[in-house]
Image (spheres, coloured by chain):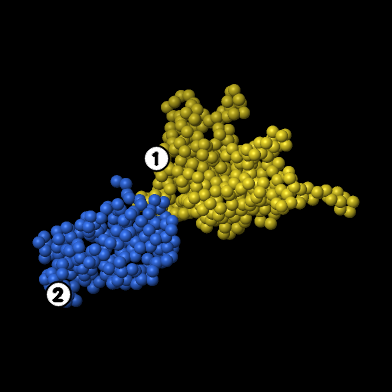
Amino acid sequence: MNKNKSSILLVEGPDDQHVVWTLLRHHKVAENFEVRDKGGIDQLLETVPVQLKGSELRRLGIMVDADENLAGRWQSLTVLLGKAGYPELPGVPEGAGTIVEHEGKPKIGIWLMPDNRTSGMIEDFIQFLVPAGDPLIDHARRCVKGIGDSHRRFRPSYLSKAEIHTWLAWQDHPGTPMGQAITRKYLDADCRHAAGFIAWIRRLFGD
Amino acid sequence: MPKPIFLHGLEIKGFRPFAHLTLPELSRVNLIVGKNSCGKTSLLEAIQLFVAEGAVFNIRDLLSSRNEISAERRGEAEAGQMIGDNLAYEALFFGRPDLDLERPELSIASLGPDATILHVAYCRFIEKIEDSDGQARRRIIIVEREDAAEGSPAALQVKVGDRERLVPIEIVDRSRRVSRRDLDSPFPFQYVPADGLSSNDIARGWDKVTLTAEEGIIYSALRLVSADIERVAFVADTRTPYNRYGMTKVSGQSKPIPLRSLGEGVNHLLGIAVSLIAARDGLLLVDEIENGLHYSVMTRMWKLILDQSRALNVQVFAATHSLDCIRGFQAATAELGFGDARLIRLEGKSGNIEGVSFDPAELRIVTEEDIEVR
């Protein structure tokens, strides 16, 4: 299959890809762009400057985890895009998702998971989609936090991953992946955070 | 022995479609891509003009190879004022200026170590004989536009570094037609045009390599397209003996067969191979390198060129339209771990042409991501 060469959303991994796909379907967003799984942050960042030199590229979305240091991630993107001919990124990411437009150059959108404001990752974004007042999420958080240091096998930065997957394990179909959890309506794809993300997608890829 | 030449970077102003083009980095092997009329051939021409230091034969060839014969100047020819051809000198300069009104200039400069600059300016001059202490001295005066006497002869002022010379266009017009494909070129570059070298040019190239160590390179190249080729010889055409053409012995065939009958690709590849060898310590320039060649040959062809560019110390500039050629180039650089190569896309509208460059690491991503680079 030929890849879409003009409009691409780069994401870090398959989970991100599936979450985006299901959100797009739920919000009936025209699929005029490709969601491409880059298999890791390093590969994704390495691809960006080369993609920007492609002769058919018109719109490029970059969706990455802020991870533990939102400011640091933003700084590295600023340097990367500065070298690629986009010197005017704002000092901090825009809360509604950053869009950069430059005369004669591809349009760029940047979304730092979970919300362009806080450090974290896609699992934190998914936690935002847990329906308000859900009784199990607090329980899941307490359980995970209750594991003593000597028994905890994941690194502290993966706390939100452990929490959301614990919560997912307690649904109708235990172990449902995040993307499908949207389809199965365990998660609220109409909540404020999901709508904000979709608005960014529409601003970037809508004609 | 001339000093080996290597262009580390290039800056072109006012030449053909380039108002101002800077290519800050060049590699040993450079593949040039871009849409039609983005100046791929013009870039190859600029390199030739620079390396030939604005030589008369080169200027005349740049113009006559593209049929740049002036319509206005035909009048002069009919009036019997013209000797030789009526070359359209405005075609050398950006925007084709009106030479009756303007005095255009162009410059082509190499960047980095050994940076040099070639300036070419169009002017008119008058010759004065002056008496200097009883001796008649000839003095050339460049006339400024305002007081340009009607009909004063035109010339190109050619400056390389601090050496300057005046080339009356009459001399260019009357100069011998020397093919750019001339393998005896006094300048360290070889040019293979899009339609390949002529049989005779290839024959002369062949004469230089036959029975030498380099002969093997030619056979390796030929066997890329036809594995059955055993031997090649150039023979005189019985009707016009100064014309020679290639014959080949193919395994399983008892009689020799004409090289041309093996397809257009064989001829193009042979032209590239003899030119590569003749370009030792200099530059090889190839237009539409993919012409007549099947896509399956591309990677192997590039591996051969990459290997030999190093062995023979040749810097290569090749232009292409073909995606298969680009993929073959990428695959060959990857397989050989050849880092001193790049792809350069010329893009933009006339006057604002820029170069976008991809190194081998970026080309790997281009292939993986299926990014359009043409």
Are the numbered discs 2 and 1 placed on the same chain, yes or no?
no
Q: Locate residue A3, reporting x and y percent.
A: 32, 49
Q: Residues within 10 Å of mark 1 (few under 14, many from 20)?
A: few
The answer to whether residue B265 of the structure is visible from this angle is yes
Q: Are marks 2 and 1 in contact (CB under 8 Å)?
A: no
Q: Residue furthest right?
A: B134
Q: Secondary structure at mark 1?
A: helix
Q: Is residue A190 above or below residue B19?
A: below
In-front residue for pair A104/A11: A104
Q: Residue at x 9, y 61 (%)?
A: A172
Q: Residue at x 69, y 33 (%)?
A: B78
Disc 1 target residue = B296
In-front residue for pair A178/B92: B92
Q: Secondary structure at mark 2?
A: helix
Q: Residues within 10 Å of mark 2 (few under 14, many from 20)?
A: few
In three-dimensional space, the C-alpha distance between marks 2 and 1, rounded to whole angstroms, equals: 62 Å
Amino acid carrying mark 1 in the image: Ser
Disc 2 target residue = A142
Chain displayed in blue: A
Amino acid carrying mark 2 in the image: Arg
In-front residue for pair A92/A203: A203
Position of B248 compared to B2: left or right? left
Q: Is residue B18 above or below residue A12?
A: above
Q: Locate residue B370, reporting x and y percent.
A: 36, 50
Q: Residue at x 46, y 30 (%)?
A: B262
Identify the image quadrant of residue B252: top left
Q: Residue furthest left?
A: A172
Position of A82 compared to A109: left or right? right
Identify the image quadrant of residue A26: bottom left
